[in-house]
Amino acid sequence: MLSYTLDSLLVPMSFWYVVAFGFGIIIGSFLNVYIYRFHTGKSLSGHSHCMSCGTRLRWFELFPLMSYVVLRARCRTCSCRVTPRYFLVEFLTGALFSLVLTITTDLWQILIFWTICSILVVITVYDLYHFIIPDGLTLALSVSAIVLLAYEYFVFGGDQNRLAWTFGAAILGSAFFLFLWVISKGRWLGFGDVKLAFPLGLLVGPGAVFSFVVLAFWVGAAISLLIIGVAKWSRGKDRLHLLGIDLTMKSAVPFAPFLVASCLIILFTHFNALELFSFI
């Protein structure tokens, strides 16, 4: 299989970052529709409409990011507020698509990573709203991660031992969360998080699974402190409005977003907790 890179197209990388962001926000707009209609029986081909008054949205109300800003986050017909989730999902997807270009310029790798990022966005938002990670999404992520590993192995010349270590480390990472699930009887995290840890472990690689586990808890602790800080700052109004939902000090916070955030931080920054510990 031949490898094609953006470098070979003789166009400045700054141009490709803009293209990736623009394509990402378009995909993010589709992901918003998918998240809303997933497991509802509604067709993805149906027309977009206001959640409050049901008015069908016109073409000029469907521009990613721009329509939300221009309409000031309100429906043009009934003036009902639109959840910031739509803007945030579009922006996040665009940002992730651009960031992918910082770790690879290979066209096939980029497409696979974009697929992975899209799945991660859906998993994160869906878990935030419903406290569940659909098995279909975890399976799709696992297949995408394996396809990425297979592509890297056959195109760039892989090491069988490293490949074995990658799967072994991912299994160990998932087993650690399984241990937590068992001893807490499902109170600390859900079984969906246990299954999700496997493909995320494949993505970060054998040398970063420990960092992936540690960082997930650090991100979770940081978000928990943020909720407590907002509660203190707002003088008893212990609510953090995020993606259109209210989080309080007593809220059960889904763990999948922390796992996903940890994985993405490691992919884009190569964070290594062991190096941090040795520095301390």
Image: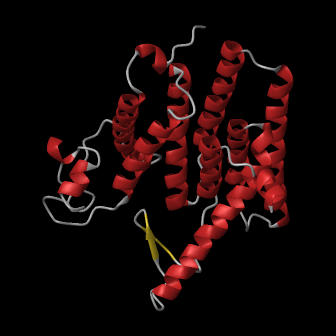
Asked which colour scheme the image uses, the reply is secondary structure
Q: Residue reaching furthest left? A: 77
Above or below residue 75? Residue 65 is above
Residue 196, how many percent across, how many down?
A: 68, 46
Which image quadrant for residue 84? bottom left
4 relative position to 154: left or right: left
The front one of 203 and 270 is 270
Q: Residue reaching furthest bottom? A: 235
Q: Residue reaching furthest top? A: 1
Which image quadrant for residue 255? bottom right
Above or below residue 136? Residue 157 is above
Q: Identify the residue at image location x=71%, y=47%.
A: 197
The front one of 187 and 40 is 187
Residue 231, how many percent across, how many down?
A: 51, 84
Q: Residue reaching furthest front? A: 279
Q: Identify the residue at image location x=70%, y=57%.
A: 215
220 relative position to 171: left or right: left
**Taking the image as drawn, is residue 112 in sight?**
yes
Above or below residue 138? Residue 176 is below
Q: Identify the residue at image location x=40%, y=16%.
A: 10
The front one of 231 and 81 is 231
Residue 162, how many percent across, how many down?
A: 82, 27
Quarter of the image with the N terminus in it: top right
37 relative position to 50: left or right: right
The front one of 110 and 75 is 110
**Taking the image as drawn, is residue 252 in sight?**
no
Residue 253, how many percent across, how many down?
A: 60, 67
Q: Identify the residue at image location x=26%, y=46%.
A: 48
Quarter of the image with the C terminus in it: bottom right
Which image quadrant for residue 30? top left
